[in-house]
Image (cartoon, rainbow, N blue to C red):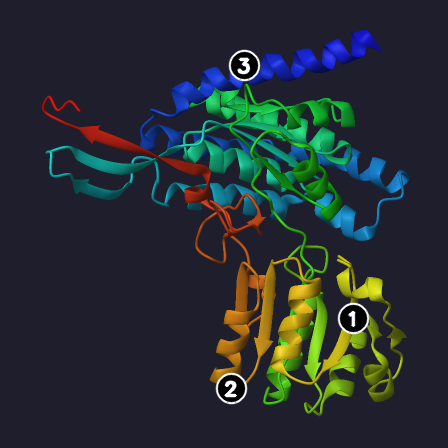
Amino acid sequence: MTNVQTTQADELQIKGQKAKQAAAMMGVLPTSAKDGALKAISAGLLHNTPYLLDANRADLDAGRAAGLSESLLDRLMLDEARIRAIADALIDLTRLADPVGQVLEEWERPNGLKLSTVRVPLGVVGIIYEARPNVTVDAAALCLKTGNAVILRGSSSAIRSNMALVSVIREAVATAGLPEDAVQLVEDTSRETASRLFKMNDVLDVLIPRGSANLIRTVVDNATVPVIETGAGNCHVYIDESADKEMAIRIAVNAKTQRPSVCNAAEKILIHQNWPHTAELVAALQWEGVVVHGDEAVIDLADGVLVASEEDWAMEYLDLEAAIRIVSSTEEAITHINTYGTRHSEAIVTSSLQEAKKFQMGVDAAAVYHNASTRFTDGFEFGFGAELGISTQKLHARGPMGLPALTSVKTLISGNGQCK
């Protein structure tokens, strides 16, 4: 056991120190060099697609043998179209402004000192995530564009895919003339190694968990490294009494079924007691294969509805399953969401601008929609390029985390001999 622990610690320490050295070089690189690396990675992914698919197929086979759910297998799966989309996203990222060096504020003091606040890289970013190999590329690309080094720790279910992806990324980064150690993958996926990563304050400047509510809570509760908390998505669609029937049904069905395994999918639907189309909405969801749970009022209004328990209201299904509750007012909907929600994405469907404003200002969430699906909470959809996750906390970053979220600030002061 001692030798195993030593080996685990050695991997983290060796890769951590290499990442710190790489971060020092990355922080001063021009945008053109970083964009060149992203273009090289994009080309490398396309050139190595068969290699990447072989590795991913091995993960999928192992996942099926282990009994992974279809929703988890969908998150894990790569195909040619997904690889092409990931490669295209890297090119899109090169078109976005580099935040590093951006001057946020300038001012001069009465004593002649001139001050400016500028964006700078965070340094070494740790990412711990589950199942989704696309996160491997997104995280590496965002960190590279912002002059950071990154240490990636994915799950055992995607280890073959992640190793193949990081191999391609590192080769492309080196070919572009950047330090390949700016991207590191922790290949030991044990819990013990993850626990050590949580406490690598001498290496990591920030740790970002991306995955299940359990993973995020474990990181938040146990890390000594500063954490940017990304959230599980117990998201809601509230249908107000004035909501257009066709719009409300279209939005609710899309938010629930378009891709149910992701965090911005709606899990709960709240309906005003005076909206007369609840049965039609339930039928539309059931037609799409959704298992519907509901309170007593919903059960009385629609067929085939299961009884919703207290646990249902707080559950993130990540599957074709939803719970519906009838409420008496927008205020009651807000109270329910602020009680059970995860501060991720919430939506109101209404013809009343007054009710929309009340909902948008009263709900505690990173993204609050009026007459639109929650499925738009995404870095690409917000125009940020690739994203590192959806932050549900209120400090430093909130909502889809694009390039600015991976920077900090530094104050530069210029004088002409002033002393205090």
The residue that label 1 is drawn on is: 323
Q: Which residue is mark 2?
A: 352
* Residue 402 against residue 187 in the figure, above or below: below
Which residue occupies the foreground of this view, 333 or 7? 333
Regarding mark 1 in the picture, which secondary structure is present there?
strand
Residue labelled with disc 3: 17
Q: CA distance from mark 3 to mark 1?
A: 48 Å
> Crowdedness of circle 1 by 10 Å Cα count: few (<14), some, many (20+)?
many
User: Mark 2 or mark 3, which has the lower sequence index?
Assistant: 3
Q: Position of residue 169 (x, y in %)?
A: 54, 28
Q: Position of residue 380 (x, y in %)?
A: 50, 53
Left or right: where 399 falls relative to 78: left
Check disc 1 and give the amino acid type: Ala
Q: CA distance from mark 2 to mark 1?
A: 25 Å
Residue type beneath disc 3? Gln
Q: Quadrant of residue 133?
A: top right
Say few, some or many: other residues with alpha carbon within 10 Å of mark 2 (under 14 / 14 to 19 / 20 or more).
some
From where the camera sits, is residue 190 visible?
Answer: no
x, y percentage for residue 116? 23, 37
Q: Is residue 83 left or right of residue 35?
A: right
- Visible in this render: residue 241? yes
